[in-house]
Amino acid sequence: MPGIDKTKISHILISRTDAIGDVVLTLSMAAFIKELIPGAMISFLGRTYTQPVIDTCTAVNSFINYDDIRKLPVNAQANYLRDKNIDVIIHVFPNKHVAAIAKSAGIRLRIGTTNRLYHWFTCNKLVKLSRKKSDLHEAQLNLILLKPLGLTNVPSPNQIIKHYSFERIISLPASLLNILSKDKFNLIFHPKSHGSGMEWGLNNFAGLIDKLSPGKFNIIITGSEKEKLLLSEWIKTLPPHVIDMSGKMTLPELIAFIFNADGLLASGTGPLHIAAAAGINTLGLFPAQRPIHPGRWAPLGKRAGYVESVADNLNSITIDTVAAKINAWTK
């Protein structure tokens, strides 16, 4: 589809119907599109549970709920998209069903990758993109899909950080704000990962707590409601100054809580990428195993970093190494 007339593009849909961390690393795309096509309306197709993350992005004008579309009768799903008057859809996360209804909805420009066979039948602009073999970061790989809209060079991680537009945050209720210390470094440990990242182990987190001065750090454990069940017995063994907030916050509250904290430690999971986008001190723990290594999935943020193991697990990452990184945040 050569010779795309960008003056006729007024509404663009970014489709990413997978997990929180993946969504965070896609948000910058909206701001880059605004630069390529000023005045364009940007919608984001996501899942119910990722909406609070998408809603933080000031470059996104509208959220479209994929879960709501799936509830519609089959013959009404394409009509739902057609009524949105979308000119372009970008399939950041390949989804066969979304690709089919986007074509049926008559969206004029449908951008997908060459390595999904169904994209050859449902998309009319294919971009050569192999994520598994690339040395680029996930956030950079996402942006390659903007080449049909005029992106000429893949932005650097620093450019991506500047385009997060991760700014629309709720005000924390007093009950949560009071958990945060005014005179200590508020440090969040998010030890579980919902299976999205390789975990460091609860014993290591416990050992790390013993290495960090309670006079300097206000340590807070977070986790989802499901993770709370996995953490409850372990939390009982921790020193009394450690605060358990697992399962006690909604996702919008957790996002705001992270924004108001000073630092976060986690493996490759959603809250890690939220913390990085929020601009707080962030440390991710990663194996050397491709494709889940930090070259692909490291947190991107003004004060984000990572520790990489020397193997396909996290066993070689010592408590002392992590403690040294965290203590350096307070100097």
Image (tube, rainbow, N blue to C red):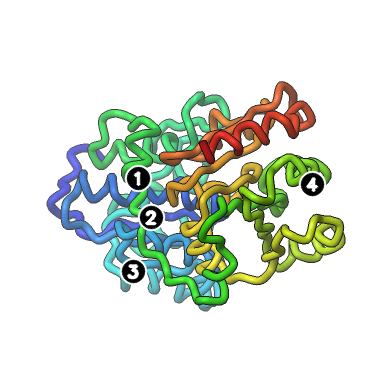
Of the image marks 1 and 3, the number of the one nearer the N terminus: 3
Provide the residue designation for mark 4.
206
**Which secondary structure, mark 4?**
helix
**What amino acid type is highlighted by mark number 1?**
Asn
Provide the residue designation for mark 1.
124
- Label 1 to label 4, Cα distance in Å? 53 Å
Q: Is residue 79 left or right of residue 276?
A: left
- Label 1 to label 3, Cα distance in Å? 17 Å
Numbered circle sitting on residue 166: 2
Q: Nearer the viewer, residue 198 or 119?
A: 198
**Which secondary structure, mark 2?**
loop
Residue extending furthest left? 7
Could you say where residue 44 lies in the image, as x and y percent from the top left? Answer: 39, 60
**What amino acid type is highlighted by mark number 4?**
Ala
**What amino acid type is highlighted by mark number 2?**
Phe
Of the image marks 1 and 4, the number of the one nearer the N terminus: 1
Q: Residues within 10 Å of mark 2 (few under 14, many from 20)?
A: many
Could you say where residue 223 lies in the image, as x and y percent from the top left? Answer: 68, 60
Q: Nearer the viewer, mark 1 or mark 2?
A: 2
